[in-house]
Amino acid sequence: MSAERPSLPPVRLNSEAELARDALAAPLFVRAVKLARWAGPGTRVGAGGELVEAQLPAAAEHLALAADEDGAAYASEAWRLAVDTGLLDVTDPEEDELPGGEEAAEGSEDAEGTDGSEAEGTVSAGENLALLTGGSPQDVLSIWLDGLDAVHADATAPVLDDFADLVGEDGSIDFDALDWDPEAEAEFLDGVLGNLYLLTLADNGAGEGPVPLPALAASMIVPDDMGEPTDDILEQVSEAMMRLDDQFRLLEPIGIVAYQPVDEALLVEEGEAADASVAGADDEDVTRYGMVRLTPLGLYGVRARMLEAGMDAPAVGDLAGKGADALLDGIAHYPESAARAEVKLWLAGYAEGAVSAAAELLAAARGTDEGAPLRRLHCQQALALAGPEAEPAVRGVLGDPELGGLARVWLAERGAADVPAPPEDMIFWLAIDTIAAQLDADGELDELQGLIEGLSAQHSGFFDEVWRVDHPATADVLEAMGRLHSDKKAAKDARKAAFKARSRAGG
């Protein structure tokens, strides 16, 4: 009815300092930093910037990893992240020239080493390495986000161990032959992370527990209007689960999720995990099919990706420092707890004091547009947080036809003396304005019904008079009262009054 609702609820993020500490503690990031500090002039890298195979055992040993294939793989992964995040700078051997324009591998037409092997690049500390200790939390988070992008790309890439013939000499991949759509894969994983983000924010943050992997996979596969899933749908859910299991194992070390992998004993029979979960496995069994939740750092990272994609993903604190009009419009459809937190931050950052803050809030609450009633409701709630110091500004609008009613309510709630009685037309106007705001807020039906019945019962002959109120929402409010009032006679009177209001307005 009024302000455009954000596509996502507001998220409460940890402070940037806390998030930066989490980023620096992410296991994969820790290993990447260690290797960046370990690398030196003698470190050997391939033409693509990768650490040469002969160096992997030493790198794994430096990281205190096992001296086996897994240790080498983890070391290689950490090295790639260090390069991708600018912690290390690698120079291609073909670009590494000596003074005078001669190539580093002088005397070799193909830039080969003296032993006939492929030439190796050089490595040095990247500019970002110093920022991890000398930069701001924002610097650290920016570097970490680059790392998240790199890991996300790895998680959505095909496993090419069995498809070596599809990789060209230049390293390009024949995706058509592989039957792999990289954009679709990235979009699917982002969709899964988006659903996990929503589930985390559900019920004002009450949904912060881990989510069963089958349920997350099903949220992307099973149509909303489908009753019993078909065998084909179950198979798709099972396949998605197995892919997500691999992806979350890759994402967890960068700190975005806490993940309990699928119990490998359940993978003996293909599709068993998804089929059992969709069919209704008990809670104890479901935990064996994989459980995942976003970490506080993960909430920050997923939101950052959403913002980069152009989505509206508000966070508590976004409106601090902006005008009161932006505040009241911005919190129009926030959950109550998030709206209170946003207002507190806004008031705390208002340098001119409580009286000026209250005056700006009241000025922003004026208007006859569709969003104005909800702005006035949130203005009244914001003034309650402003404290008694706001009283001079509130008393200054007692004669205002739009704000005088809420000013009297605020003063009465604080037990203020010398509050003038409102004229009758202001009482009716405030009743219409209050109900219009609650209709716009999409509150609980029982609460709205109680408000409607309470306001209409306060005055005998309410519906005989209220239709004359000069408020843009009068007819709409009366029609709503006719639908929601539990008393049949009162509901009929409300509908008659709505007809009179529309006739009076010429509509």
Image: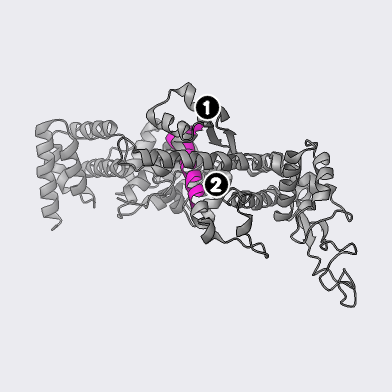
Residue range in magenta is: 187-212
Determine if the magenta segment contains residue 450.
no
Whether pointer 1 and pointer 2 mark residues with C-beta atoms closer than 8 Å, the reply is no
> What colour scheme governs how the chains and residues are painted in the rendered image of this protein?
one colour
Give the mark nearer the N terminus: 1 vs 2.
Answer: 1
| Residue 165: quarter of image | bottom right
Can residue 205 be seen at all in this image of the molecule?
yes
Q: Looking at this view, is 278 or 366 the one in front?
A: 278
For the residues carrying marks 1 and 2, which lies nearer the camera in this image?
1
Query: Which numbered circle lies on residue 288?
Result: 1
| Residue wearing tag 2 | 302
436 relative to 498 in the view: left or right:
right
Q: Gap between marks 1 and 2, in whole Å?
A: 26 Å
Residue type at mark 2 is Val
Callout 2: helix, strand or loop? helix
Q: Nearer the viewer, residue 457 or 93?
A: 93
- Residue 210, percent from left and from top: 52, 31
Q: Element type at marker 1?
A: helix
